[in-house]
Image: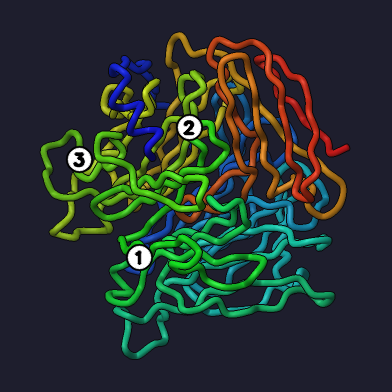
Amino acid sequence: MKYLATLVALTAHSAVAEPVFTDRSDRLPHHVYGGGWEHFVGGGLAVFDCNGDALPDIFAAGGENPAQMIRNTGHFTFAATDIPEVRGVTGAYPIDINADGFMDLFVLRVGDNRVLTGGPDCQFTDATDTLGIPHSDSWSTAFTAWWEGADNRPTLAIGNYVDRADPDGPFEACDDNAILRPVPQGYTSHALKPGFCPLSILAANDARGRPTLRLSNDRHYYVSGGHEQMWDIAERRFLGVADGWNNVSLWGMGIASRDLNGDGLDEVMLTSMGDQVLQFADADGVYTAADFAVGTYSQRPHVGGDGRPSTGWHAEFGDVDNDGRPDLFIAKGNVDQMPGMATRDPNNLLMQNPDGTFTETAHAAGVATFERARGAAFADFDLDGRLDLVVSNRRAPLELYRNETEGTRNWLRVSLRQAGGNRDAVGATIRVETPSMSQTMQNTIGGGHAGGQLLPRHFGLGNDAVAIVHVTWPDGTTSTHEAVAGESVTLHKP
């Protein structure tokens, strides 16, 4: 944090690129995330390649409507694809749970969660019972996954919202969360409690360099005594003050994680009702809230004339102009008609400046719509090297935007492969070194708000044309690879 504050004080404010997105929502099949109060939250998107053609495809939660699988048919055209009908879906995350090379989906629901296993040509099969996933009537709103030790199957963490069976609910009636661990017969469920109604969970290395679960919780339901949580995966315990963890209480909605200053530690963005809180990590394992001058709080609408506080949902870092500095998108929208919060609440597109501050550009870029946005994803849908954007809305159709920013710079995409059950090397860290910069990215499943992506990891390279890619694999071994700009490389564990 001191590092960034020094840069802000000493570096003159520099102009950012002028991002331009063109609305291509008419290219998508009609789909709406709808439903009553149990679908005020959720509305996530899973983005992944379902048929091996390298084009990102979309699975969209439907709430009371059926979820929809949308296949990318190339040239920025998309088509609905038949899958087993699933209703009550709040979100989904891509994961190759059976390591067969076809991406699967862990589908979050109000009620029993489902696992849809992928097959050729974007075909999916409901394999929930075959895989031995325990049944539950919980209201699930968050998910993350990781592989432990020599396990061939992942450990799964599920965040559950309000306990609908609690007669004292809905306030102060948060359900227990669950960790599903693989056993020979399938999976067994272990309660992770206390639960404070998480709307996002992320398994990743924390500021200490240790694998942890970060849980972002909705203060509206824990009212008192609750807070954001960090759970040490190896020691199986919640962190406290003695670990350098200081409790933070906010109306937690989503998590985004990315190293912003090149020190190898991930900063964390927490969306909320009101302030959107960016936390900087330091070498002592402590997180510190960003100064207001950094420009990420985005606590009120930036256009539209509504001065009430904003409501942030999905947040995602991505390098929109490929300058080597991650930018930030935040999906915004009122829960429904909450009178104390903005109802005209546009999305944010925050472009990172050379001095580490951020500048709001969503309105000029064409993505500051006023629907009740929920889920979102950056993905290069046409493989032109520029990150495009898809947004899901409550009670309104999906939105799709093509990145047509002029003068974008060089880029590199990196995929990881290894033998065994963890085929996509989830838990690895990728470091890209070029003559002018160093960037790191963790290869994770989770975070966001009720949705995420599992695609090649996208790095902007600025004007650099060559890169050295260092991979720290999940088992701690390392490897080094050479790459050139404009490549989509698949790196295999030696």
Asked if one can make out residue 427 in the rendered structure from this viewpoint, the answer is: yes
Q: Name the residue rendered at 52%, 55% in the picture.
A: 67
In this rendered view, identify the residue nearer to me: 400 or 420: 420
* Tag shown at residue 261: 2
Amino acid type at mark 1: Asp
Q: Name the residue rendered at 78%, 52% in the picture.
A: 422
Q: Quadrant of residue 460?
A: top right
**x and y percent of residue 106 in the render?**
63, 59
| Residue under numbered circle 3 | 301
- Mark 1 or mark 2: which comes first in sequence? 1
Q: Secondary structure at mark 2?
A: loop
- Mark 1 or mark 3: which comes first in sequence? 1
| Residue under numbered circle 1 | 218
Amino acid type at mark 2: Asn
Residue 487's place in the image compared with 82, above or below, is: above
Q: Residues within 10 Å of mark 3 (few under 14, many from 20)?
A: many
Q: Secondary structure at mark 3?
A: loop
